[in-house]
Image: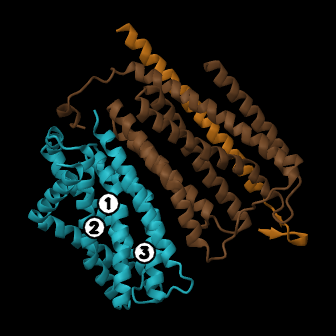
Amino acid sequence: MRNVATGIGLLGILLLLVGSYVGLFVAPPERHMGDVQRIMYVHVPTAWIGLLCSTFAMIFAVAYLWTGRNRWDDRLVGALEISVILGGLLLVQGMLWGRVTWGVWWTWDVRLTTSLIMFLLFAGVLALRSFVEEPLRRATWSSVATIIAYVDVPLVYFCVRWFRSLHQMPSSPETVHSSMIIPLRINAFAMLFIAIWLIAWRARIESKSRGAERPPERIEIKGALNG
Amino acid sequence: MAEGPAGVIIGGWPYVITAYSITAVALALNIARLAARERKADREKESDSND
Amino acid sequence: MSTFQQALFVARKDLLLGWRARTRTLAVALFGMVTLVLFSFAVAADGEVGVSAAAGFLIVALLLSSILSLEESFRLETEDRALEGLLLLPVDPVAIFYGKAIANFVLLVLLGPVLLPLTAIFFSLELDGANLLSLALLWVLAAAGIAAPGTLYASMTSRVTGRDVVLPLLLFPLTLPILMAGVRSFDLILRGDAMSQLKGWTLLLAAFDLVYWVLCGALFSRTLEE
């Protein structure tokens, strides 16, 4: 299993190199944005896979609450971390793009705003984890917080979209020319494979660490609420 | 940002390179971090089973 | 006792305790006032910026005050290990959640008659009867939206070191929709609703409230397990 995951990851890295090469040097420059639009070939895949990983986190959280099996918490940690990393990257890439195309480092358009909130929400779950030492409680609370965070994301998205609907906001390109689809797809798969690899790896590490801890005893309530 | 002929934005390359580089560095750092963490977890398991 | 009755019982208990410690409760209101004053100094309160920002300041003041109020609602439980005592009684955890959430909701609503007039005064806003009613409804919805996730998170963070940091960290990003809906609606109420958007925003707030009152209630008992 471990080797499969690593294999997938290496394939992902390879694809990322290929896709980026195509996106940077082979694909044609965009009509209005020129070369800066090439950021899209890494930005859009980051967005897609970032959202996907947060969905994985949600699924793992539900699975943990449903089954109580530790493996789901291990995977949850992996998914949370990747979501936060990709989320942070998304913001940075977006800011660089925005700097060139809109002239500002930041703007409160729908996507950037939602990305920022999502980043904060999931980083918050990781922060919560760092404050809770008892493994059982940490796992349960992380799952609860993840579900709550995930449910919030579409609400935030719609709110911001509506909030901004009256203003003329610069928009990110929606349609993509066919010759640009290829590097986009390659990098999307690349990011997906890398994400899967890193989640699986992180999960394995977490289960190893868990093995090294004392297994959580069936503690009575009295002791547990010492926190 | 300067505009070239026909309104195309030029001079965006440094930003593109930065974006890709930061992405690559972030992934690399994460991989390094995981590797280090795994080593630590292995060591702890080692010492635990030796107790 | 049905779960519903249990919830009301818990709510009543919490509100009674709040009343008995009313100096503390009033302190939260005072904090809200101070926050508004700070905001008034942050911008020229009666200038154009002030008026347009008033709604935002009001809701943010509510959010900041809510942290104090929520933490307070669980402080007693953790100080004397009273939460365990409550759990030992045959009380449905769901009832505990909704009871505390209702109590927190009421306390937040009560901040309205304090903070709203002050906002109007500090930022030179004009409120008439019809506006007031709409604003009251808005306030109730916003308070509800904060109370549900706030109660859930407060119950968790009250049992954790670093609780003061983690609660706002978790709660604030979550309540962004409330902030946005609140600010937009407030603006529309005060400055006219040319395109009849108010209904939409109100529905959005109501949807948020519904989702979170159900979701948090469902998840609460899981956070008590050990």
Look at the image and name its color scheme: by chain
Can you give x and y, in whole percent of width and height, for residue A207 in the image? Answer: 46, 23
Instruction: Say which chain tag 1 marks.
Output: C
Instruction: Say which chain tag 3 marks.
Output: C
- Which residue reaches farthest top? B50
Which of the numbered marks, if any, corresponds to residue C108? 2
Residue under the image location 48 percent in, 88 percent down? C191
Q: Do the residues labelled 2 and 1 touch (CB within 8 Å)?
A: yes
First of labels 1, 3 by sequence position:
3
**To which residue does mark 3 refer?**
C56
Label 3 secondary element: helix
Residues at marks 3 and 2, CA–CA distance in whole angstroms = 17 Å
Residue C74 in view = yes
Can you give x and y, in whole percent of width and height, for residue C199 in the image? Answer: 49, 76
Write down the colour of chain C: cyan
Rendered brown, the chain in question is A
Residues at marks 2 and 1, CA–CA distance in whole angstroms = 8 Å
Looking at the image, residue A188 lies above or below residue A211: below
Looking at the image, residue A35 lies above or below residue C128: above
Task: Indicate the amino acid at tag 1.
Answer: Ala
Out of B11 and C159, give the one closest to the viewer.
C159
Rendered orange, the chain in question is B
Residue A37, quarter of the rendered image: bottom right
Task: Indicate the amino acid at tag 2.
Answer: Leu
Position of the C terminus of chain C by quadrant: top left
Looking at the image, residue A211 lies above or below residue A86: above
Residue C162 in view = no
